Image (cartoon, helix red, strand yellow):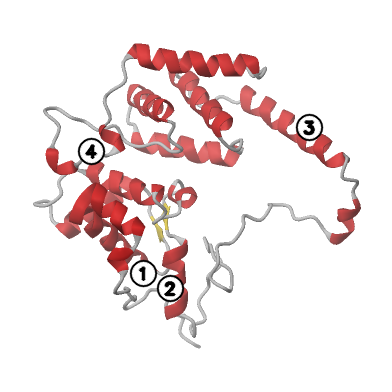
Amino acid sequence: MGRRPKTGLDYFPKDVDYYDDFKIMDLMNEYGPLGQTIYDVILCMIYHEGYYLEVPKMEQLAVKIIKTIGNRWVKKKDFVLHVIHYCAEIGLFDQALLNQNVITSVGVQRRYKEVTVRNKVDRSKYWLIDENGQPLLNAPKNTISVTETSIPATEIPINVSEKRQKESKENKSRRYYADPALEREFRLYIDMRNHTGPELTEEQIRALKEELDSLGETDEEKIGIVRKAFASGWKSFYPLRKRPGKRSKKQGSHNFMQRELTDQDYDDLEKKLLKKQMEGGITFE
């Protein structure tokens, strides 16, 4: 009986022009050598397992990274989480998979493929690139057979419209949180995302809810996280930065260090979105 092919790597290549990469420059500029070290530790963790790292909770990963680097240099989980999410923002990690607690990227998988080109390893799960190393396009869940391509083009908009109306009604009738205030804030955030980009699918909304639940311990904390993401126009949720004293100069001036919005600021933003909803004929229950 043959041995199971090894998926993890004993080494991975690092280009000599690594620090000339604009993404690495952005990371270094934002978080300095400590941010780069956190990214490097995560890469080693990924390649030790294969081409992706699947974790139950990001907080657990942050604790492990702190132990690896040493709490003399990094003490707070929030800082590590900010670095991880920033890496996704600038394209070092895949944002959609990160929302599912899976860390990988096109670049990571390209290097993995180069090293394992002769190995018969399963690359089906979370695989992002084609045979030429180019990013895969998101394939539809239900592919259309050749015989179905003869459907008149005039029927397509009608079917799409009916499907969207049905999904919209289902989303409005579905309740995500028992707390009315949290439910309202979460729905406002979802509506903001739908206004500023492609309409979210139910799977994406569930992934966002899971992310929010993992970051906030109480309903009040979750409301604060949602409000911050809403006001900043973020495409994901991030933990609230707890600042008991003065702002630390060592941690730079990242977007997470923006001034806190007042209630009036938030109310103004909310009124603008509600006005857009009314103009577009969209209402929230």
Q: In front: 2, or 202?
A: 202
Left or right: 217 as drawn, with respect to 145: left
Asked if 43 appears above or below 167 in the picture, the reply is below
Amino acid beneath label 4: Ser
Q: In front: 244, or 88?
A: 88
Q: In front: 131, or 285?
A: 131
Q: Are marks 2 and 1 in contact (CB under 8 Å)?
A: yes
Residue at horizontal 35%, vertical 51%?
Answer: 87
Residue at horizontal 65%, vertical 19%?
Answer: 280
* Residue at the outermost left position: 72
Q: Is residue 64 visible?
A: no
> Mark 3 or 4, which is nearer the eye?
4
Left or right: 64 as drawn, with respect to 266: left
Q: Measure the alpha-carbon separation of dots 3 and 4.
A: 46 Å
Q: Are marks 3 and 1 in contact (CB under 8 Å)?
A: no
Asked if 144 appears above or below 193 in the picture, the reply is below
Q: Which mark is residue 47?
A: 1
Q: Which residue is mark 3?
A: 162
Residue 117 picture location, percent across and down: 49, 82
Local secondary structure at mark 3 = helix
Q: Earlier in the sequence, mark 1 or mark 4?
A: 1
Q: Earlier in the sequence, mark 3 or mark 4?
A: 3
